[in-house]
Image (cartoon, rainbow, N blue to C red):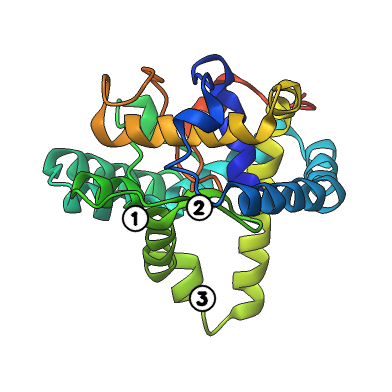
């Protein structure tokens, strides 16, 4: 549910007009997807959200920022790889420099000195890469726990697992690996607490999440004019990666 909740930020940008009629071909599994969506919201309400709220209450903001910086940094090689696969050599070089600087001067990514000198983070995902290669999205899928995706997105998740540093290089230290992955998920969910109201206030939260996801993926692949609305925001599956937009909307409880 982490991924689906992150889409709530797009409430003011993504249009849901037309709903089922416009997207019937995109969402042929809507009845099943709605059931999974309901399950995800229930699981989030009783498990993940309480953990995130406790995490938010206990840790001071500088500590939470350092944890966010660390996970952004450790995921940077995946951004570099996707920029290379998309042919963005200059951006791949920029993100590589950012990774080296934050890993060394930034104390393994706990700090972000690269941004202060103009090496800003630029997201790139496998779903985006496959889309730029011309792979069709396929049907919309609401995945248990992971949230909104598509057939192409599922392939992207698989590629993400294969290239994730924590998942692969700590395979022999599974206790440490599992704790880091749990921390990453809880940290991400905490950063999304401030947008819960948006998804709750939507006339149909399911359609709101679906259309926000669809339009933002289109924007990521094609840029302005490629989607129904110029969303103007980058979206990365928050389970895997954190985006800079949350810095402009601090989560509830940041003090």
Disc 3 or 2, which lies upstream in sequence?
3
Q: Looking at the figure, which quarter contains the C terminus? A: top right
Residue 199 position, x and y percent, is 69, 28
Question: Which element type, helix, strand or loop, lies under badge 3?
Answer: loop
Kindly report which numbered mark, 3 or 2, lies closer to the viewer in this rendering: 2
Q: Is residue 119 above or below residue 148?
A: above
Q: Are marks 2 and 1 in contact (CB under 8 Å)?
A: yes
Instruction: Report the residue marked by disc 3.
Output: 170
In this rendered view, identify the residue nearer to me: 137 or 54. 137
- Sequence-wise, the earlier of marks 2 and 1 is 1
- Front-most of 24 and 36? 24
| Residue 13: image location, x then y, percent | 49, 16
Quote the CA–CA distance across marks 1 and 3.
Answer: 16 Å
Is residue 117 toward the left or the right of residue 202 in the image? left
Q: Where is residue 90, by image quadrant? A: top left
Assess whether mark 2 and mark 3 are in contact (beta carbons under 8 angstroms).
no
Find disc 1 in the rendering and name its residue: 78
Count all numbered tags in the image, as a single digit: 3
Q: Residues within 10 Å of mark 2 (few under 14, many from 20)?
A: many
Q: Which mark is residue 102?
A: none
Q: Residue at x 50, y 70 (%)?
A: 167
**Which picture quadrant has residue 161?**
bottom left
Give the CA distance from mark 2 to mark 1: 10 Å
- How far is disc 3 from disc 2 in space, using C-alphas? 16 Å
Q: Hey, which residue is sitting farthest bottom in the picture? A: 172
Compared with 184, 196 (above or below) is above
Q: Upstream in the sequence, badge 1 or badge 3? A: 1
User: What residue lies at 45% left-to-right and 29% top-to-bottom?
Assistant: 22
Secondary structure state at the residue bearing disc 2: loop
Residue 126 place in picture, x, y as percent: 33, 53
Helix, strand or loop at mark 1: helix
- Residue on which the image places disc 2: 240
């Amino acid at each position: 549910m982490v991924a689906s909740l992150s889409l709530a930020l797009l409430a003011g940008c993504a249009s849901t007009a037309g709903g089922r009629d416009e997207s019937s071909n995109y969402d042929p599994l809507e009845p099943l997807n709605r059931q999974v969506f309901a399950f995800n919201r229930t699981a989030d309400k009783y498990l993940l959200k309480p953990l995130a709220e406790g995490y938010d209450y206990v840790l001071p903001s500088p500590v939470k920022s350092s944890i966010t910086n660390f996970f952004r940094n450790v995921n940077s090689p995946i951004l570099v790889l996707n920029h290379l696969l998309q042919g963005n050599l200059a951006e791949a070089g920029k993100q590589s420099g950012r990774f080296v600087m934050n890993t060394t001067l930034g104390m393994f990514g706990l700090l972000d000195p690269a941004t202060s000198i103009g090496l800003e983070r630029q997201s790139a995902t496998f779903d985006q890469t496959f889309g730029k290669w011309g792979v069709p999205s396929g049907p919309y899928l609401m995945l248990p726990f992971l949230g909104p995706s598509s057939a192409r997105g599922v392939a992207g998740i698989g590629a993400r697992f294969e290239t994730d540093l924590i998942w692969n290089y700590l395979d022999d230290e599974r206790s440490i690996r599992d704790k880091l992955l749990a921390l990453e998920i809880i940290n991400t969910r905490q950063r999304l607490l401030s947008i819960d109201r948006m998804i709750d206030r939507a006339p149909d939260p399911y359609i709101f999440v679906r259309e926000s996801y669809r339009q933002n993926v289109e924007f990521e692949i094609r840029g302005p004019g490629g989607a129904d609305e110029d969303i103007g925001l980058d979206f990365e599956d928050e389970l895997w990666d954190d985006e800079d937009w949350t810095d402009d909307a601090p989560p509830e409880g940041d003090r």
